[in-house]
Amino acid sequence: MAIIERPSVIPAAVGGAGATALATPSSSLGVFRRPVAATGWRSWVFTVDHKKIGIMYGVVSLFFFIVGGCEALLIRLQLAAPDNKVLGAGLYNEMFTMHATTMVFLFVMPMAAAFANYFLPLQVGARDVAFPRLNALSFWMFLFGGIFLNTSWFLGGAADGGWFMYSPNSSRLFSPSHGIDFWVLGLQIIGIASLVSSINLIVTVLNMRAPGMKLMNMPVFTWMVLVVQFLLLFALPVITVALFLLSFQRNFGAAFFDVDKGADPLLWQHLFWIFGHPEVYIIILPSFGIISEVLPTFARKPLFGYKFVVFSGAAIGFVGWGVWAHHMFASGLGPVSVAVFSVATMLIAIPTGVKICNWTLTLWGGKLWFTTAMMFAIGVIVLFTIGGLSGVTHAVAPADTQQTDTYHIVGHFHYVIVGGAVMGLFAGFYFWWPKVFGKLLNERLGKWNFWLMFFGVNLTFGPMHILGMQGQPRRMVVWPEKLTGEGFFNLHFWNQVATWGSFMIALGVLVFLINIIHTAKKAAPAPLDPWDARTLEWMTSSPPKAHNFDAIPTVHALDEFFHRKYEEVDTEHGARLVKVKSAEEVLAAEEARADAHIHLPSPSYWPIVLAFGLPIIAYGVIYNLLLSVVGAAIVLLGIFGWVLEPSVADDSDYDPPAGGSETKELSPVG
Amino acid sequence: MFVKPFSRRRVAAVVTFGFLLAGCAKDAPQDTFDPAGPNAREIDSLQRPVFYIAGVVGLIVLGAVAYAIWKFKDRGQDIPEQSHGNPKLEILLTILPAIILAGIAVPTVSQVFSLDKKDNDCVINVTGQQWWWEYDYVKGSTCGGVEITESIVTVSELVIPADTPVLLRITSRDVIHSFWIPRLNGKRDAVPGRLHTLRMEADEPGIYTGQCTEFCGLSHARMRQAAVALTTADFQSWVTNQTADYTSPEAGTTAAIGETTFIAQCSRCHQVDGLVDGAGNPVLAEPDRFVYSGAAPNLTNLMTRTAFAGWTFDLISDECRDRLWNESPETFGAAYLQGVWMYSAADATAPACFNETNLREWLLNAPAMKPMYTDPTKLAETGGKTRGMPALGLTQAQIDEIVAYLLERK
């Protein structure tokens, strides 16, 4: 598809120079022509532009972040005092299930997808992803899946089985509401979205890099995203199978996890965690990628041990498949399995440790510029180190039999996910905001945002380590007064600290939202290269033009953009790095050799139509299979429309730049 | 962060004071750092050094980060050399954690196997169900040298002889639960259709609390348990009492009426061993007809326990509980064996420690105290069987009678 849609880019990707535009029909096959709107809502709803899709991913994820955050605050309010009555037991169970589900599947993963969508093509010097319509499909499936999942709140209650939904507690017998059906089917839809997007991004990285960009010249963010896509590609089918089994058990009377019929409920645990552990790395690696961009930029030196960071990321990706049973040390697997998984889990600490050392050594000897993005990135090093080290204590299986399913674990994985992944995403927000929106987020508000979140995370999740070791299990709607203790480590005080801390995080997020509004309304346009950045995404205008680059850059080195700006100059004090060109000059040089013909993929009606059919099928599975037939018809219609759609829009070619003059702003016609 | 020196001192003072407090006051009763038996102590002996190592490594890394932040901040120095790393240093920094982890891995593996040993002087079957634990002492077995002459089925409070390795054989009747007494051992899941073992041993007599730690549905938070360790002599007394013949209440008392009320209202689900009806036929509970898990707590010796309903609600008053929990190992058993009659004068006619309010409230409307699936509209999947005790619509008079009757189940 991409070959037809984007004829000018393909020869570049395979190394050829000349662009041979293929003659393609614009209306012969389809009933509809392709949409062409470049402004208004149609330009968003039917877009296949990776940047617009990236922004939409970001907006929706941010919305779900707020939803999941409110759920978290309610949980913390309930646990602020012994035998508290803010939430009832049933609602509380729904709340923590949906908090985890929302944060993992509707915030961290899609927010990483937002960054990946927007910046991966820019970082590899491409004009879009390999399959632009599939990209739009991924987004719409994610959005509809997320909405579908959350409609359960209004249709008899959300899922209440905990986010790992252990069987047999997840069967209809034990959870008679439709909550878990919504959960299963919603995740299924979101899972397809991620799977499609993973294939898309893998092909993009492998096939569409700018000339000269070898794999080992790719920015680390792109590398980490690539590793994540492979993890998704292999992990999602496992959870898809598991979800199908559960779906069939709940809705069609199958007995995959029914003990009475001879099933072993541990099957679910294995399936879930074979997905679930790689999922942890799916969550964390994009953030590792982001801070591996941010730290070198603001330390003004390349990432220390680029190859080690890349290979350790890949190693984490591989070893991550061999540690799933460390979530099951208390499940009764027997000592041999436990010992093996215990040691494997320790193994994975090594590549993780390598990364932390490399980031620290990137700072070492640098010229550190403490922007908000940099502070968030350093925050990730600090918080992830704590989370990683407490992780090592769980790898010790006997110790884990004390720690598992307590607040100690909750503290651990929130240091990893909030301290590691979310803080990393925030580093990305502050770092790339000017690239996406052409305006710098306010640094003063940014500092407030950072410190509130940094202290908030420590106050919320630090005490949880204490609470867990004092015997407070997770997922308990109440903890009783009589088990509180009186000493320094009493449950009462530290639960209160955690609750105050959670509101501090919320305040930090609020400051961020205020910052967004403030920036949109008040901020002046950002300079072209505000951070003196290093990678290709900065070698174009901000926000980038629809076609990203006027000319596809030729890459000579890691940190290409930096090396175009800086050169080593001999002085009387020895060789010094001196800025020889400004970003504007680098850009002007690129514009001067702008491509004559740039074919961009045309927008399409069909991704949103196809995606819309899926939740209807899902509602049908829950309520009435006739509805599923309607949904399936919509999906089928979408597929036919998609296939028969003309490959380009009428006259949607872009005007070639007028013979090397200064008018390089290319606009679509039609 | 701008911390004024004086406030830093104040913070230090608060922290110091906190640690001083920690020295005098007791931490939570489920403190995993306070092992009270050989299994938990073995774990502790590994867990503590690992925490210390992690702490030291953490301090080194965070110290390095802090130093780098301070040392290399932009003071107008040159753009640094664009070096891409130092392979020797990289390899060193890979090998170093590998060595530390190998040092942790060796004792870990050996301990995984040693904790899995099954040698014991007592076997107790443990069964989890929504939302309480049942313990079954098999007739004819011996437990710490004490012969179990009759089958004992008890609930929530696991009574074991101190200083004796006990092997729990753990399973579940419905969903997955997890048995955890933090001061005695790590946790082990109770999985339906599977039998897992876990060793328990307490050094000294005392009460060790615990909690179900695998999310098991609506009232997961209210599925608690305790292990009670007694000296061999006290354990013998406990067994003797548990296996004693049933005695009916004295005729004409409220308790005697209560027996009839109990048979009419409660005995369909709750077993009281030895209970016979007016015609002299044994009254056998059939919880499998009414409760999904097929079990309901055995009430034969209810008043020997200190809490009920998944060990959530106390049968004894708060004062008595505090006093009992703080008894010395020497005096604990004598008090515990009195059940709700503990700390009562020898000639007392009413138990001093009985927490009547909780029990009466429970009899009046159990689901209001502990959420359970008893709502008829939600029982379609289980064919009308509840998952917990429904509200029975008892009158105050009936409650009086049942309480009086139960008070004699000691």
Image: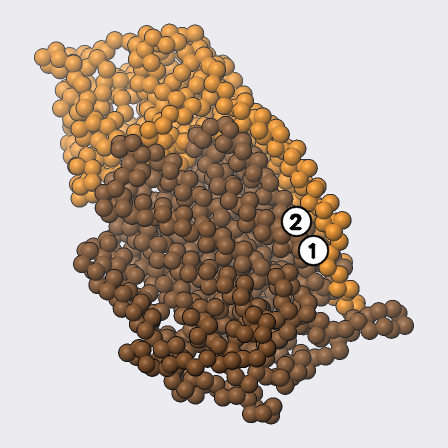
Chain colours: A brown, B orange
Please name whichever residue, A6 or A568, is drawn nearer the observer in this view of the structure: A6
Q: Name the chain under label 2.
A: A
Residue B293, relative to residue B142: is it above or below? below
Q: Amino acid at mark 1?
A: Gly
Residue at image coords 14%, 20%? B260
State the residue position of label 2: A354
Earlier sequence position, callout 1 versus callout 2: 1
Residue B399, relative to residue A516: is it above or below? above
Which residue appears farthest toward the right when viewing the image? A572
Q: Amino acid at mark 2?
A: Val
Please name whichever residue, B208 or B292, is drawn nearer the observer in this view of the structure: B292
Residue A204 in view in this figure: yes
Residue at image coords 42%, 70%? A1
Q: Position of residue A496 (x, y in %)?
A: 48, 47
Query: Dots 1 and 2: beta carbons under 8 Å?
Result: yes
Q: Which of the 4 image quarters holds residue A658?
A: bottom right
